[in-house]
Structure formats: C-alpha cells, structure tokens
C-alpha cells in the first residue's frame, strides 16, 4: 500500500506562484498530478517517471508548471507559476506503475490540497 500526502495549497492572486509537495511512502512509482474543479471531472496536469528523467504536461499548464521529484526524500513536487483563476481546483498527487496521463492507470491517491487563485 502506497500512502501519499499532499501539502502546499492555499489562496493566491493571479500571477503568483505556489509549490505543492507530495510525500510518498515509497519512491518506486511514477507520479502524477491531477486537479478537479467544482462541477468538473478530475483532469491530468503533469506526470513524471520514476527517475525523474521524463515529464509530461497538459497543454493548459505547459510552460507554467514544473513537476519534479526527490527520490532520496520520497517526495514529488509541482511548482506552479503564473497562476490563473482557472487553475483553481483541488490538486491530487497519484502513484502508478505506468507512466501515463490516464487517471484510471493510477492506483494510489492522496487526499488532495486546495488551490484557489483570485483575479
């Protein structure tokens, strides 16, 4: 069983930055970040391979968000820059045996952290 705990969410203004963290009980999984806004489906944001050498982003965040990981600390990160009101959502960290953008491929999920961006 893999346990994931997100932190770092909060209320910021448009244009600000936030860094989310995902503390994992193990480091041997691919990590992904997803988000879910009220009334919308959970959507893919970014994914990173086990080594950290490969990353992939949703078009909506490409160039603004950076996913990374520190396997020595069993922690993943999502650096979010130039935040927009449409980035407002609950952000979830997830772990998978497969490097994927499909949320169905992720077996383990954190509890989520709220990010609110005001205009």
Image (cartoon, grey):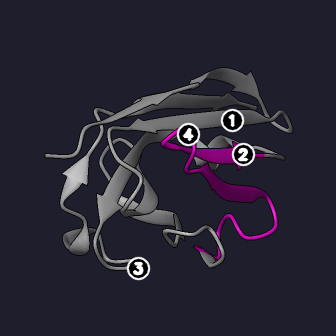
Residue 19: assigned label: 1
**How many badges with numbers are in the image?**
4
Q: Which residues are magenta?
A: 56-80
Q: Position of residue 6 (x, y in %)?
A: 43, 32
Q: Earlier in the sequence, mark 2 or mark 1?
A: 1
Q: Nearer the viewer, mark 4 or mark 2?
A: 2
* Nearer-the-camera pick, 105 or 89: 105
Relative to 49, is 110 on the left or the right?
Answer: left
Residue 116: assigned label: none
When the figure is inspected, residue 17 is found, relative to residue 37, above or below; the finding is above
Residue 79: assigned label: 2
Q: Earlier in the sequence, mark 4 or mark 3?
A: 4
Query: Distance from label 1 to label 4 (Cα)?
Result: 14 Å
Question: Badges 4 and 2: C-beta atoms under 8 Å apart?
Answer: no
Question: Badges 3 and 2: C-beta atoms under 8 Å apart?
Answer: no
Q: Secondary structure at mark 3?
A: loop
Instruction: Tell me the crowding category of disc 4: few under 14, some 14 to 19, or many 20 or more residues within 10 angstroms, Cα based.
Output: many
Q: Position of residue 92 (x, y in %)?
A: 39, 44
């Amino acid at each position: 069983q893999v346990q994931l705990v997100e932190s770092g969410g909060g209320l910021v203004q448009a244009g600000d930055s936030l860094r989310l963290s995902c503390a994992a009980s193990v480091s041997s999984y691919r990590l992904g970040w997803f988000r879910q806004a009220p009334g919308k489906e959970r959507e893919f944001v970014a994914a990173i391979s086990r080594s950290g050498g490969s990353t992939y982003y949703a078009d909506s965040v490409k160039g603004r968000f950076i996913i990374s990981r520190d396997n020595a600390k069993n922690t993943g990160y999502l650096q979010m820059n130039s935040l927009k009101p449409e980035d407002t959502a609950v952000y979830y960290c997830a772990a998978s045996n497969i490097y994927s953008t499909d949320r169905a491929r992720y077996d383990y999920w954190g509890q989520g952290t709220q990010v609110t961006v005001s205009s």
